Image (tube, grey):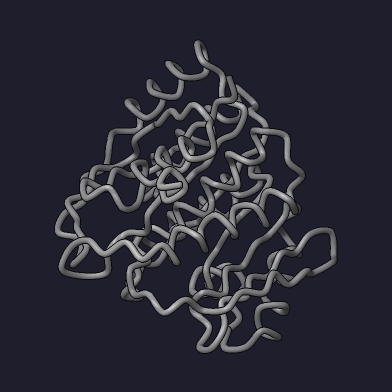
Amino acid sequence: MIKALTIAGSDCSGGAGIQADIKTFTAYGVYGMSVITAITAQNTTGVFGVEDISEKMVEAQMDAVFTDIVPDAVKIGMVSSEAIIHAISKKLKEYTPSNIVLDPVMVSTSGDALFDRAAQSVLINELMPLADLITPNISEAEILSGIPIQTKNDMIRAARDIAGYYKGAILIKGGHLEDRADDLFYYEGFGYWLPEEKVDNPNTHGTGCTLSSAIAASLAQGATMMDAVKNAKAYVHGAIVDGLDLGKGNGPLNHLYQLKN
């Protein structure tokens, strides 16, 4: 049985975080496990509370997973404190898993920073070097590169800047571009555009979580990095196009849309 682990926060409304990740693993036919880093009170209209799990409990969860059911890939999402980032990094170095996908969740949908500069520094200097792929959105790529991004050329410049200190693969998500949803895959000095038209559907809650966990699931199954990214992008596109409409705000995509067929 292929196995994947998500290290992320909990979304009680089920659209993002570990809930989205495990649904995605299931859609890929992969056995999903979770290490919870934070509990959030949120729904389609907003986030109303966040409570971090202690770093000792994060370490204990990772020990429990890696000493029993060893994952074939690891997806990392919301890690909102220095202590938690240190704990995750420590255990990843101890267990050395393959296929680590880091979604550097640093900015909320509304544009608010989710943790302070000190935690950002630890994430960049300690956790990022352990990842095989990072999947920043445009706002996060701006933080990682220090370059304002408004165009596709800006995305290329940002990727080159990030590649100056990070040696893994980079996927800058273009969903926040005005007229397109083209992503940039950048690795070993070369950039590859993954074009996509924008879907007229405001219900995209959890898209970033879903994409990174889909990549991890595909890597766990043995796909190359490029094929894993392409497969995941197609899966997310289908989940948005399905048109699920839940809640009073920006609702989730349909992670299990393929089961309808």
Is 169 located above or below residue 83 in the figure?
Answer: below
Left or right: 16 in relation to 261: left
220 or 247: nearer the viewer: 247
Q: How many marks?
A: 0
Q: At 39% from the left edge and 42% from the top edge, which residue is drawn? A: 8
Q: Position of residue 182 (x, y in %)?
A: 62, 75
**Residue pushed farthest front?**
261
Q: Which quadrant of the figure has residue 218?
A: top right
Residue 41 vertical placement versus 96 (above, below): below
Towards the viewer: 75 or 112: 75
Residue 125: percent from the left, percent from the top?
60, 51
Q: Position of residue 144 (x, y in %)?
A: 58, 67
Q: Work out whether 74 lies above or below 168.
A: above
Q: Going by the image, does 245 lie left or right of 255?
A: left
At 19% from the left edge and 58% from the top edge, which residue is drawn? Answer: 43
Q: Quick one: which residue is furthest to the top in this view?
A: 68
Q: Residue at x 38, y 23 (%)?
A: 61
Residue at figure coordinates x 51%, y 74% from the top left: 175
